[in-house]
Image: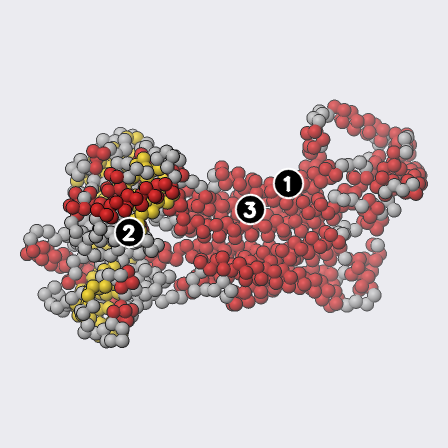
Amino acid sequence: MPDWKRLVRVHLKLPPLHNQRAERIVEEIAGQLDDLYQEALREGASPRKAVRAAFAQIENWDELSARITDAEGPNRMSAVDQRREDARDRASAPRGGVLHRLFGGIGMDVRLGLRRLAAARTSTAIAVAVLALAIGAGTAVFSVVDAVALRGLPFDEYDRLAAVLETDGKGSGRIGAAIPGLSLTPDGNPTETTYFDWRRMQTAFDGLAAIQPSSLRMRNELNEPATALGLRVSAEFFAVLRVAPLIGRPFRASDEVVGQHRVAILSYAFWQRQFGGAPDVVGRTMQFGDARWQIVGVMPRHFTYPLGGARQTEVYIPLAPTNGERSRAAAGTGRVQLAGYAVIGRLRPGVSFAQAAERMKTLEAAIDAQNPNWRPGAQVEVRPLNEHVVGNVRAWMVLLLGAVGLVVVLACANVANLRLAQAAIAARDVAICAALGASRWRTTRAFLVENLLLAGSSATLGMLLAWGGVQVLARTLPRELPRVAAVAIDVRVLGVAVLAALVTGLLVGLAPAALHLRPRLSEATSSGGSRATRGRGAKRIGNALVVGEIALASLLLVGAGLFVASFARLMSVDPGFDYRHVLALRITRPAALGNTRERDAARQRGLAMIEQARSAVRAVPGVLGAEVIGGVPLSGVRFSLPVALPNRGELTKDEDLADVHAVTPGYLALMRVPLLRGRHLSVADRADTPRVVVVSQEAARRYWPGQDALGQQVNGAEVVGIVGNIRQQGPELPPGREMYFPLTQAGVPTITLMVRTAGDPMTVVRAAKKAVWSVFPEQRFDETVTLEGFMDRLTAKRRFLMALLTLFGALGLVIAAAGVYAMLAHRVVERRREIGVRLALGATPQGVVRMVLGQALVLLGLGLAIGLGAAWQFGAGVKAFLFGTEPADPLVFAVTLVGLGVAGVLAAVAPARRASRVDPIVTLRCE
């Protein structure tokens, strides 16, 4: 039965009445309406239509309003005057046709929405916090993914740029070995001579540019020897990328001629640092090495190439190839080219990548036919430059985006559940508004406006969180990521964030609008309908949302657990040596030139200077020891050479190559590599003594299976010792086949001084450099690094993934627990009368607690079953990202089960205890 007195007050917009005579008039009107309502029902009208018919049959509303106002007192504005004023307002309001019907009175909806949100401060605060965290995390991660993997390259028509590679056809990206007539180039770089053949004969590109890193010796602002990070580029480089210097000119073909090549283009940052941004820098000269170079240009502020790397290019110089680089005939059949060129090109109009690849393969076949012994097995590959730059990181960037997407969906489900509860409270007002003629759109719009207000405030707070998050992410991202310097919140990211906020507001408002905007007037306006209860449909959707939250949280926690376990197992791998507290200083010793006697004398002087430098560094306080090696462990640099064994010839296959090191006698002891058999190298192993070598256990197993390696001959040297295996390339790769030759018996021009310290190596850097400068006054140190720094770089990607996914897992756990708590808390309020009756009829508080906890456990069980089952099914998708961990790791699943179970039970405890404390007397008295 409708509450007719309340409907009359709402229809006449009456203030609270204090006069009995006015109350009697309202009761008379209510009785009349009830008679008309019953008559309409008997005629077959629905309850809703019957209410409208009853109100329509009373025509003297103005008179009735005036009687009530007169009875209430002369100082109150009459309802007639109020209605006339409202009519004047409506008449003076602008009419906008369809737009007016859709959006007219939206200001009132905004004010109403703000009042409703303010009235439910606790649930509003929880919803805003949850959505802000989700939007902030999503925006911050999208900023990273967009800058690194989604955004196009910062060049004109970047989708026409290509990387042209030369591979071995096996996917390793490495060509051949150090065999006469065969070149060894990393990362798919073609040899220098191959590039010039391509440039001369190709028909697929408007231009092919060659690129090669270079180090330029200079002095820094403290007048100390330093190195500028340079890039040798061909004259086509700037035209291919379609970039021009900010001031000055690009390189010309004449700049590539040796002798005319001493011109340089500076990066913007280098220009600012070295010349203070002087506008007249073009035409000045700068000392690089032993010569003066003329500055001909400065690049724009944001230009850099390559697009990744811990350090940005500072100086661009012409390629200036030698005759040996230009021509195979000049190179000679025994030349080994170790570096090669990175090659990029711009497709000609009308040429696709597939067509370019076919043309380059045809060209490669023609070159091979002319030079059959130069590069057997080499294959050319053409791929989009954007894919070449970001291809290796796109997969795990998409993984991050998917993980943060789960967090956003989880937050939306949580807030939608909260809004369902709030919508139940507002259902009575909605029903009355509908009974008085409000359209379905008007009542729906009120809900949507309220939710958009909630999402807007969440987005504002979320953007502040995202700004701080981007600052943190930019500092913790691996430096080798492409375009990491471009990570920032820009207009593109802001647009996505605003769109996400709008969509979120609409999503979290759909379920309440669908369920509570089908008003049941007889329930909402009856005396028994005064409780804020939800129907079966709303309760089912609420339960489904909680189950979904728990399932999504399970997925996030399993993912986080897998990456934590993977990183822990990676860091537990023994590299075979102690890399902690070791500083690496690269030293270039004087070149040995002239005839044989002069070269030998220069070599001996170089060895003596190295020994002096070692002694000077060992004298630095805090230094425990200093030794020399030809390459740096964990740096990614390796010298792999064929192995010559008596009676077996030369082993040249990739799986047979050995990693060769030239070391001082105490190096292995300094690095704490265990000696298994034989002896270490010693100072007695000189250039004029028989050649000796120490090999690793893996090398001994590979080259002398089932035999004793000691005393064997390899590459003309006798094996005098066997040491433990080391993981020279990092913990993710298996131990290599290592060979250690005495530095005195090897001719390595560039070496690294390994300095072990008692504490933090960076505290002795300055003193160690001064010690080296006392022997090598012009020595440049490209980069001051520690072996721990190299290890950090090797594990940076996994550490970053682990940290973010752990954060997302923790957010999922908190949001799911908050969802369980909010659902049960509102359910307790809804069932307060039922609980009071149960307690009055003899139920115990412990029984009530068990009842509430039972509901929570059922939802927890369903959510965990769905979530863990989905994680089990989709685990194979992340297997490629894991190290030493299976996607179905039982420990990770067990920890997730226990963690979410405990969190859910703890979240249910407070509502359960509140239910057990319901006072049945107070509850029944209120009823």
Q: CA distance from mark 2 to mark 1?
A: 62 Å
For disc 1, the marked residue is 453
Of mark 2 and mark 3, the one earlier in the sequence is 3
For disc 2, the marked residue is 378
The amino acid type, in three-letter code, at marker 1 is Leu
For disc 3, the marked residue is 135
Left or right: 908 in relation to 670: right
Contact (Cβ within 8 Å) of mark 2 with mark 3: no
Mark 2 vs mark 1: in front: 2
Q: Is residue 317 above or below residue 414?
A: above
For label 3, count other residues whose C-alpha is less than 10 Å away and answer few (under 14), some (14-19) or many (20+).
Answer: many
x%, y% of residue 533?
76, 52
Numbered disc 1: secondary structure = helix
Q: Is residue 722 above or below residue 23?
A: below
Numbered disc 3: secondary structure = helix
The amino acid type, in three-letter code, at marker 3 is Ile
x%, y% of residue 346?
34, 37
Q: Quadrant of residue 65?
A: top right
For label 1, count other residues whose C-alpha is less than 10 Å away and answer few (under 14), some (14-19) or many (20+).
Answer: some
Q: Point out the image quarter for the C terminus.
A: bottom right
Of mark 2 and mark 1, the one earlier in the sequence is 2
Q: CA distance from mark 3 to mark 1?
A: 15 Å
Q: Quadrant of residue 763?
A: bottom left
x%, y% of residue 37?
90, 41
For label 2, count other residues whose C-alpha is less than 10 Å away and answer few (under 14), some (14-19) or many (20+).
Answer: many
